[in-house]
Image (spheres, rainbow, N blue to C red):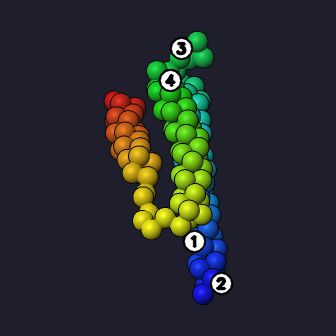
Amino acid sequence: MKDEIKDLRISDHMANERTLLAWIRTNIGIIAFGFVIEKFGLFIKQMGLILGKVTAQTSSPIHGYSTIIGIIIISFGTLMSLLAYINFRRVERQIEQRATTYRSSEMIYALLILTIISVGIFLVVYLIQSKF
C-alpha cells in the first residue's frame, strides 16, 4: 500500500513537471512572437525606404509602436515563465504535503488571457493604422 502511494506521488510530480515544461514552451513562443513583432517595425521602415515612402531622415511612427508592443510581449513571456515556476513549486509543496485538494492558480490564467486579449487589440489597431 505504501509503495502505491509513493508511485502516485511520483506520477503527480511528473505531471507537474510536464505542466511546467508546457508553460515554458508557451512562454518561449510568446517571447519569440514579441521579438518578431519588434523586428517587424524595422522591416516596415526598410520597405518604406525601398519604396520611397520614407526617407532615411524621417522616422516612421509605426516602428515605435511595434517596438513598444514587442517589448511588452517579451516582458510578458518572461514574467509568465517566472509565474509558471512559482506555480510549479506551489503544486510541488501540495503534492509533498499530500494535500487532499488541488488549488489552481487563477491569477496565471487570468493574466495570460487578459494579456492575449490586450495584445490582440493592440495588433488590430496597429495593422489598421498601418494601412491608412
Q: Nearer the viewer, mark 1 or mark 4?
A: 1
Q: From the top left corner, tell me how far across and down residue 20 is, in percent.
A: 59, 58
Instruction: Tell me which label, 1 or 2, sits earlier in the chain.
Output: 2
> In this view of the protein, which residue sits in the foreground, 118 or 23?
23
Write down the residue under mark 3: 58
Q: Secondary structure at mark 2?
A: helix
State the residue lying farthest toward the front.
Answer: 2
Q: Quadrant of residue 3?
A: bottom right
Q: Tags 4 and 3 in contact by the CB under 8 Å rule?
A: no
Q: From the top left corner, tell me how far across and down residue 34 is, in percent.
A: 55, 40
Q: Which mark is residue 12?
A: 1
Circle 4: residue type: Gly
Instruction: Tell me which label, 2 or 3, sits earlier in the chain.
Output: 2
Q: What is the CA distance from the residue labelled 4 to the residue labelled 3?
A: 12 Å
Horizontal side, residue 40 vs residue 7: left or right: left
Horizontal side, residue 4 vs residue 117: left or right: right
Q: Tags 3 and 1 in contact by the CB under 8 Å rule?
A: no
> In this view of the protein, which residue sits in the foreground, 65 or 12?
12
Instruction: Tell me which label, 1 or 4, sits earlier in the chain.
Output: 1
